[in-house]
Image (cartoon, rainbow, N blue to C red):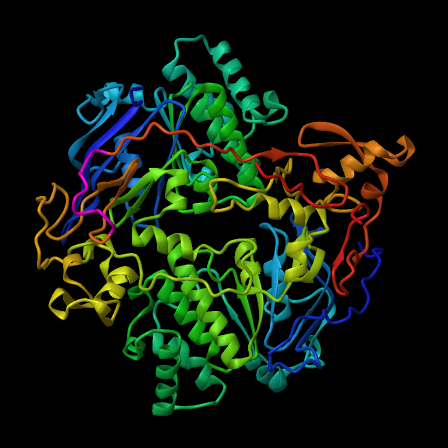
């Protein structure tokens, strides 16, 4: 995908900042042309025979105190984006600027200081807490490691963090297994808050929780953002949750961003056929659904062997429909999900660039057909 | 009036644990009619899966056992059926699909072997014909190139494909009732839409009844005919799908509906139900929802203090109506039914075709505690299209 047109520097998405105290100048995080490839090794010598391009040329902006929602289906690379930004996974190429500083070029003591500002909340509230540590130590450890407080001062800080996330301060002496899923997620949030970060990657923070608990956690995250001006990269597959929570939204498919816009614009006026299909597939809690549903055929292809051209072309209803109105010379026959049909040749041959599709600046989509 | 295909009457299930018996299903009654989709909704630990497994008598025993109640299939009680006959019911009359298709398929046999095994067990057909039936059942669930796929192993397939195989296997013997336990929870939303569309189509073709078990109110709203909401091992509300979403009566159902994030509701604060789902070993006394219930709390703020009680709600003291606890000040005129505890409201018909169990639903005290039975079919079926208008937006259609 190296010959794909680069999206180039992107203008910060103009958002409705009315009534907000967030400074408009200066982005907190700028991700440019990020690539994360995992080698596929085969044979006795473990020779690299190819790459899984989990993240392929992703560019994002996150404003201070705002939320960027990152959505897509399993295997689209959204989790890898979050982890690569935090350097939990090494990047193959690209840059991440935190307040203008190159995160990937930062070393040693400076990197350790940088990590204070960038935290993560995980999906699995069970697996992400050490079962042999008390809640107090889980939350207190980063405070101690970073030399913020020790002894009783540390304990006071832990107690205030616990009560802030809605837990009793006496819980500091207990172990994670004594808590329910929702409470464990609160502990994970308290740990992420311990160093007073201004950026948190929330990796599916509510998908493992019951419906009645999900909204408690989402409200808590929203309150914390308002109080502390924390920016979130909110990774989720539930589009209704993302709409509710995000200022900007980026949609990923097979390692690529296929559409990016303000949340209002993306949901009101989706441009990429994948976004449209994804939105139409969300079941509405209404027994008289008003929307027609586009049922996509086939499944997400393997990222180890992605389709040529536009990665969505084998499932794309738009490429197929456009072919019916195009000259036969501009179309090709393909086989997908057990069917043979014609699509626009361009979709199969060339990767579409992320380009503006909408009057609003910053609404970009990667599609040859969508207007 | 049509006869129900399956009728569950006052089902009570107990699990004998070292620290005493827990009761994951208490006094559950409902009926499912041919061709109907009956949804059992609730959060983890509410007893919906145990109810489903009890219908097929598949709960692990010990520790589990059916304490009382009847499960009538065409009027014959499955609870009292000898195990040998029960085995011919499973798969033949009632089939089941599970949330995680990988763990329900045997990894060391091809999917063809597994489907053919089910076919040969229930149908008197020669092996060659069984393979033909298996191939046809894969074709019915929309799997391309079924003859080749029969010889593949489960690990060679994606999650959505494995769920299709599970459905093919479950439907290979033409069951009249399909129990689908969270059939799409592990799947991505575009694949979920495919599977639900497939189930709707197969249901129409075969007039098959579906017991749909899920926590997703969106899936319920778009697929169910009748809905039963479970909380803390009991059915707390039951109604036709339109009625339930238009007029939710139980405070738990209301809280659940309010807390679902909806498309198009940007920036509003989500309503939340405080506290957490109770552990079946430590159910609160009286109405099982009272420590989390906003309704009783609101009533208590304006009620005569003699009518209220201070209770412990997830570490916090809150005032609730005494009626909702196990210390009711005015005992109900109707004696509690089996399965309920003192002060716990039972399921009563509070409106036409609408049952709820809450002391403070209008008309509850006078309402009769009838057995819920609803032969209802939904009015609007979700429309699926493959077409796409060239502007790139989905067509807006109002039914």
Frontmost residue, B93 versus A146: B93
Question: Residue at the spot x=72%, y=64% of the render?
Answer: A92
Q: Would you place residue B76 above or below residue A327 in this image?
A: above
Q: Position of residue A275 (x, y in %)?
A: 66, 50
Question: Residue at the spot x=19%, y=58% of the render?
Answer: B284
> Going by the image, does B259 lie left or right of B201?
left
Q: Position of residue A297 (x, y in %)?
A: 64, 35
Q: Would you place residue B115 above or below residue A306 in this image?
A: above
The answer to whether residue A42 is visible is: no
Tell me the magenta residue range: B361-371
Answer whether residue B78 is magenta in the image: no
> Going by the image, does A44 lie left or right of B230?
right
Q: Position of residue B52 (x, y in %)?
A: 31, 35
Position of the C terminus of chain B by quadrant: top right
Q: Would you place residue B383 above or below residue B116 in this image?
A: below
> Going by the image, does A341 lie left or right of B138?
right
Q: To which quarter of the image does residue A167 belong?
A: bottom left
Position of the N terminus of chain B by quadrant: top left
Answer whether residue B370 is magenta in the image: yes
Q: How many marks?
A: 0
> Going by the image, does B238 lie left or right of B214?
left
Q: Position of residue A149 (x, y in %)?
A: 43, 90
Frontmost residue, B260 versus A350: B260
Q: Would you place residue A278 above or below residue A31 in this image?
A: above
Secondary structure character of the magenta stretch overall: loop
The answer to whether residue B123 is visible is: yes
């Amino acid at each position: 995908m190296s010959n794909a047109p680069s999206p180039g520097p992107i203008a910060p998405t103009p958002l409705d900042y009315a009534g907000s105290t967030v400074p408009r100048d200066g982005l907190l995080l700028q991700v440019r042309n990020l690539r994360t490839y995992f080698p596929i090794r085969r044979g006795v010598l473990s020779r690299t025979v190819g790459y899984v391009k989990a993240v392929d040329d992703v560019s994002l902006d996150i404003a201070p105190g705002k939320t960027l929602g990152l959505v897509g289906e399993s295997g689209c690379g959204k989790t890898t984006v979050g982890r690569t930004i935090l350097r939990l996974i090494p990047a193959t190429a690209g840059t991440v600027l935190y307040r203008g500083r190159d995160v990937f070029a930062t070393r040693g003591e400076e990197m350790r200081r940088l990590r204070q500002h960038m935290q993560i909340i995980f999906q699995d509230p069970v697996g992400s807490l050490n079962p042999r540590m008390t809640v107090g130590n889980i939350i207190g450890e980063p405070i101690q490691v970073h030399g913020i407080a020790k002894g009783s001062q540390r304990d006071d800080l832990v107690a205030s963090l616990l009560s802030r996330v809605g837990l009793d301060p006496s819980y500091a002496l207990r172990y994670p297994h004594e808590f329910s899923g929702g409470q464990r997620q609160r502990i994970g949030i308290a740990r992420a808050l311990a160093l007073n970060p201004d950026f948190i990657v929330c990796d599916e923070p509510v998908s493992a929780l019951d419906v009645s608990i999900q909204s408690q956690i989402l409200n808590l995250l929203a309150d914390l953002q308002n109080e502390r001006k924390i920016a979130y990269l909110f990774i989720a597959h539930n589009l209704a949750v993302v709409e509710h929570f995000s200022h900007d939204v980026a949609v990923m498919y097979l390692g690529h961003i296929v559409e990016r816009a303000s949340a209002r614009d993306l949901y009101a006026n989706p441009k990429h056929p994948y976004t449209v299909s994804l939105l139409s597939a969300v079941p509405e809690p209404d027994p008289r659904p008003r929307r027609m549903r586009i049922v996509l055929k086939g499944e997400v292809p393997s990222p180890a062997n992605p389709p040529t051209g536009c990665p969505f072309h084998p499932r794309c209803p738009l490429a197929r429909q456009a072919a019916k109105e195009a000259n036969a010379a501009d179309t090709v026959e393909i086989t997908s999900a057990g069917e043979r049909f014609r699509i626009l040749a361009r979709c199969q041959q060339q990767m579409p660039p992320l380009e503006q599709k909408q009057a609003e600046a910053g609404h970009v989509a990667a599609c040859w057909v969508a207007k | 009036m049509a006869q129900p295909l399956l009728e569950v009457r006052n089902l009570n299930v107990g699990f004998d644990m070292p620290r005493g018996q827990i009761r994951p299903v208490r006094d559950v009654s409902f009926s499912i009619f041919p061709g109907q989709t009956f949804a059992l909704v609730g959060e983890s630990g509410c007893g919906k899966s145990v109810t489903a497994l009890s219908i097929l008598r598949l709960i692990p025993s010990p520790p589990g056992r059916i304490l009382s109640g009847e499960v009538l299939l065409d009027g014959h009680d499955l609870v009292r059926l000898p195990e040998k006959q029960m085995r011919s019911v499973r798969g033949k009359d009632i089939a089941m699909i599970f949330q995680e298709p990988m763990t329900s398929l045997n990894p060391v046999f091809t999917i063809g072997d597994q489907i053919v095994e089910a076919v040969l067990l229930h149908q008197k057909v020669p092996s060659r014909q069984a393979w033909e039936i298996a191939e046809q059942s894969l074709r019915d669930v929309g799997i391309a190139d079924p003859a080749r796929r029969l010889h593949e192993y489960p690990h060679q397939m994606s999650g959505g494909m494995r769920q299709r195989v599970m459905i093919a296997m479950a439907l290979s013997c033409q069951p009249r009732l399909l129990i689908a336990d969270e059939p799409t929870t592990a799947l991505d939303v575009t694949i979920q839409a495919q599977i639900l569309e497939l189930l709707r189509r197969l249901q129409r073709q075969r007039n098959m009844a579906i017991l749909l078990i899920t926590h997703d109110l969106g899936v319920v709203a778009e697929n169910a005919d009748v809905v039963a909401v479970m909380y803390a091992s009991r059915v707390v509300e039951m109604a036709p799908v339109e009625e339930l979403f238009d007029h939710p009566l139980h405070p738990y159902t209301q809280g659940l509906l309010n807390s679902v994030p909806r498309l198009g509701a940007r920036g509003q604060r989500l309503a939340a139900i405080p506290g957490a789902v109770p552990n079946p070993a430590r159910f609160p006394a009286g109405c099982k929802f009272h420590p989390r219930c906003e309704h009783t709390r609101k009533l208590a703020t304006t009620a005569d203090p003699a009518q209220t009680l201070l209770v412990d709600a997830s570490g916090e003291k809150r005032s609730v109506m005494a009626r909702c606890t196990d210390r009711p000040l005015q005992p109900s005129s109707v004696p509690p039914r089996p399965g309920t505890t003192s002060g716990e409201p039972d399921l009563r018909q509070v409106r036409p075709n609408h049952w709820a169990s809450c002391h403070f639903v209008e008309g509850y005290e006078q309402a009769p505690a009838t057995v819920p039975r609803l032969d209802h079919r939904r009015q609007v079926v979700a429309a699926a299209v493959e077409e796409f208008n060239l502007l790139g937006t989905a067509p807006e259609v109002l039914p």
